[in-house]
Amino acid sequence: MFSEFTGQGVRVAIIDSGVNPSHPHVGGVAGGIGFKTNGMSENYLDYVGHGTAVAGAIREKAPQALLFAVKVFDQTLRTNAKTILRALEWAIENEMDVINLSLGTFNQSYFEEFERIVARATEHNVIIVAAHETAGQLLLPGCLPGVLAVELDWDCPRETFRSKTDGARPVFLASGYPRSIPGVTPEQNLNGISFAVANMTGIIARMRQSNPGSTLAEIEKFLLPA
């Protein structure tokens, strides 16, 4: 879908473990920032490989998008809800078009804070692409209206997506596999919901290039089968 578009000029924030911009699957980034529990840093380099693989999956589908590394993990894939909220705030303030968020929190005590940040994103027409659930549990902010919700479908081809409804809202399903690495089987490579989100983000970046002012509701309507 939108294969004639490349995501050119679309600003995509990747909230993850940072990015290695020299990786051949990434081909550079437009900028980035690192978040710590006690502040921010200019260091957005990825030391665990997860964010780099996510960036590579997005780059594959949107080769001319402007990727921004927003680092919330460091040596392990662990962070907290406050840091995710700060990262989302940064992405909105820095005029991203799309935010890739393959993580979230089960902690419903943060419901109102995430609801407020999603409302801000909607106000600024920033599309948050986020994991809807994992292991059968809903994640914030991906379960909130105003977020493009993604779930995992192991049987879905990497270049496309599927859809379903959860009550009144659409949910999109995508492949949980990243770009392939020569000599590494899909089972040995990183995989999971993170890459379903990334694969969907690449498609959304192409859509934003084709229709820069499109709202989330318009994007969802277009993506759903007629």
Image (spheres, rainbow, N blue to C red):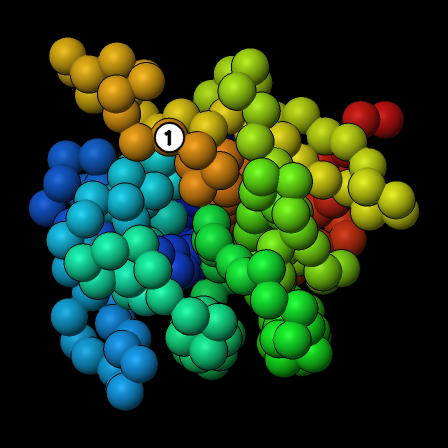
Q: Amino acid at mark 1?
A: Asn
Residue 216 % position (x, y): 70, 55
Q: Residues within 10 Å of mark 1 (few under 14, many from 20)?
A: some
Which of the pair 36/8 is nearer the observer?
A: 36
Numbered disc 1: secondary structure: loop
Q: Quadrant of residue 29?
A: bottom left
Residue 159 % position (x, y): 49, 22
Q: Residue at x 81, y 41 (%)?
A: 166
Q: Is residue 93 visible?
A: yes
Which of the pair 131/108 is nearer the observer?
A: 108
Residue 204 position (above or below residue 178): below
Residue 114 position (above or below residue 50): below
Residue most extreme to the left: 22
Q: Residue at x 44, y 33 (%)?
A: 192
Which of the pair 65/41 is nearer the observer?
A: 41
Q: Is residue 221 visible?
A: no
Residue 206 % position (x, y): 51, 41
Which of the pair 42/38 is nearer the observer?
A: 38
Residue that numbered label 1 is attached to: 191
Q: Quadrant of residue 12?
A: bottom left
Q: Residue at x 10, y 46 (%)?
A: 22
Q: Is residue 49 left or right of residue 222?
A: left
Residue 99 % position (x, y): 49, 58
Residue most extreme to the bottom: 38
